[in-house]
Amino acid sequence: MKRDILFKIIVFLAIISMVLTACSSTSSTNSQKPSDTKAKNAENINTEVQVDAPFDGWVEGLPKITAPEGFDWKQFEGVELNVITENTPPSSALAANINLFEDVTGIKVNIEQSDLGTVVEKTSLDFNAKSAKYHVIYADPYQILAKHSQHFVDLNAFIDEKTMPAIPGGLEDFIPSQLEVNGYMGDTEALYALPYDNPTMVLAYRKDVFEKYKDEFMADKGFDWTPGPNLTWEQYYEAAKWITEKAAAGEITEVKYGAGHQAKQHDSLMNDYSNILAGYGGDYFEDTELGAVGKSNPGKSAMTSDAAKKSAELYKKIIDVSAPGSTSWDWSGLGEGFAAGDIAMAPEWHEFSSMFENPDSSKVVGKVSWASLPKGDVRQAHSYGGTGIGINKYGTDEEKKAAWLFLVWATSPQAQYMILKSEVGGSTPTRHSVYDIEEVQKGMQAGTEESKQMPNLLPMKVTLEAWKEENVYMRPKVPQWPQIDTFIFTELSKMLADQQTPEETVEEIAKQSDQATGN
Amino acid sequence: MRTNAEYSKLKDSNQTNYKKEKSTSFLNLLNIKKYKTEHWMILPSIIILAIISIFPFLYLIYASFMDFMISSDQPTFNGITNWKKVLINDTFWASWGRTLIFAVVGLLLEVMIGVGIALAIYELPKGRNLVVTLWMIPIFVAPIVAGLLGRFLLNSTYGLYAWLLSLVGIDVQILGDVKTALAAVILMDVWEWTPLITMIVLAGLQSLPKEPLEAAQVDGANYMQRLIKVVFPLVSRTILVALLIRSMDILRFVDTIKITTEGGPADSTKVIGFYLMEVAFKFQDFGAAAALGLTMLFATIFLGKQFVNFMTKGDE
């Protein structure tokens, strides 16, 4: 009797569940028609005349935010925009100054900041549901844009729309390599995002240590160890080993270790190793054109090359003489280790400069210099980690237009300048025009008042050099990257733990990459 | 005495009756008239149960046979591809292996320490409530916070434990070394969840009948004898309940690993829960993730069933 009732209940539940499953399979198909991009009062707008926007924060020398005559900045008043972004300095600065945008437009902006993994997860689920819970998205070129470009609005529709505000200074004011990697996917037909931040790996080093022991090292090793474009990765290894040994013997007291690295089993490990791999002429795929606009199929892995093997061997050697904490550090851990005064050299994202120059978080204030990364057999290579912001195409037309106004403002030269100067921000601008301002130029000189106000400008001279085409390293922009990235840093982590040789490591990466890409 | 022919006839007729009965009972389900008021009263609960539990379960099974990459508009049927992808994968089995090590070592430590502390608290003449309150604090900490605490304490730059170890000449990077990382995250879990075991066992101890203990004492049994012969047999089921709760929970252990080691170094802390999260949310391969999740579900059901069987043994 009991069993019979139980059986009936189970059958009943199954029937309900099947009905629900069937209902859920019929997903709503979102209209693929081009959106209406016109301003609400388009008939009253004179597109021949541009009028300055009423935003605060403009300074002499920067392109202004403008709109065609008659454009009503309050036309989307009441619209609520949800922005999802990684918890990075520019996002904190925007959140702290969002009233500058809200007061002018009447648009309410909610900025949600999370770690990148969470941003990727939430964005993916939102795209899958086509619900546009998030209207403006931090479009990481490798983890989000490469995989989901079809879910973004083609910004050309707004750029070509004369009744809406244009990008101040035009697209040409963005640093070209950054616009390419952050904005496009597969080709340059559609523009999905505008450059928003641009962390790049350069070398932070303790100038006090390098000056004090320069002669002693030179007498011992026979070469000038000053970090810069002439230092090779082998010489970097020699310098790191020498300092670590001398510090262990008590002869060097300023630091404990010659170098520190972000070699945790994490995305940071891939970035850290990529500087050496690319320096020796290697890359992750045979197709070397993947770093800019990207491709949907990257082709065969290039990780069995001699450059890959050599760079893996050297990387292992370097980590073995670096701070032992390196294998548990991502970029934040390395930053903390360097700021604590334990390390003489650290390949680190240039935006950590503000942390190193902040007395509340650092013991090395005033002792840090920046240089380009050492070179390999072929070139110097600096991993680039910048991101753009784009618009979710599943929002309503009104939300998309409101989001466009936000993009125009958030990526404008004056907003970038505000972020640079913000106490909670400190990110470096993605605009040429901001770097041309005299105040910013002075800020790049160590010891000036401006450099104290904007400490992230201290590494900018070497960072601007690092952004040049011959010096920058853009990792492959392919849809399979999150998986391949995981294979790379997991296998490298096994190598650093002495579980496999460098040769076995690169071969394993190549094998897994080819499996993931179907090559 | 029946002939073989009679036997087979009887068997056939029994089978026919059974089939008729089954089909009738199924059709009876659709006979609305026969339902009583109480049936209609539990209907909303059944529907809610279907929505929040059975439907996702069936959907998970459905997804495990589909090409469910998030970038595709409509999932397509791909047979057992996802299952093959999951089962013919070294990382999957290695993650299960680590999960088993994690579960066995973690549970053993939690039970031994938890029961020990419960017995100690039980014997306290006074101040029991205060001790229990203090001992329970870790349970109220979110696992992510426990992970952060562990990460800060073991940080080689400013961590208290790292500094204490360096004073005695141990300069090991606990979370950055394959030999110590797994042990460290197990200990973080033990720190957080041992009090739960203590609380459950303590509740069991407090509900023990006084007579057997007094009788044992009158018979001259010492403390250890009373513990082994009387107390443990009486609270064994309570300990089993605590074990069941924790073992199911430990299979899903992710938070602390995510915040401390992210599965490293060299995959040494990549347990099955973390691997599932990676496949689902990083690789965004929901088909494979569904198959992987189902293996975890089957393991949990199997484990639960074993416990239930063990506990109901001798009840019938």
Image (tube, coloured by chain):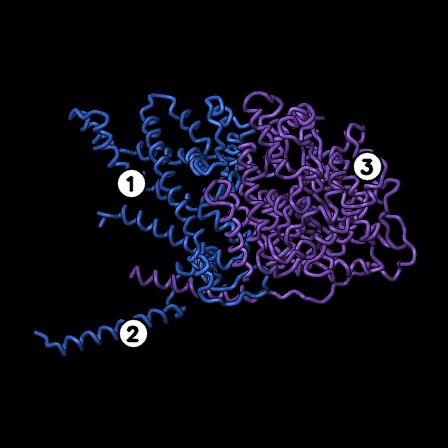
Chain colours: A purple, B blue
Residue A440 badge: 3
**Residue B4 picture location, percent across and down:** 12, 76
Q: Amino acid at mark 3?
A: Val
Q: Nearer the viewer, residue A444 or B247?
A: A444
How far apart marks 1 and 2 lie (CA) works out to 43 Å
Disc 3, SS: helix
Q: Callout 2: 10 Å neighbours few (<14), some, many (20+)?
A: few
**Residue A120 picture location, percent across and down:** 60, 50
**Farthest residue in the left direction?**
B1
The residue tagged 1 is B237
**Residue B191 picture location, percent across and down:** 43, 33
Chain for disc number 2: B
How far apart marks 3 and 1 lie (CA) works out to 72 Å
Q: Amino acid at mark 1?
A: Arg
Q: Amino acid at mark 2?
A: Lys
Q: Relative to B222, is A292 above or below?
A: below
Discs 3 and 1 share one subunit: no
**Residue B44 picture location, percent across and down:** 46, 58
Horizontal side of residue B260 vs A240, given as left or right: left
The residue tagged 2 is B20
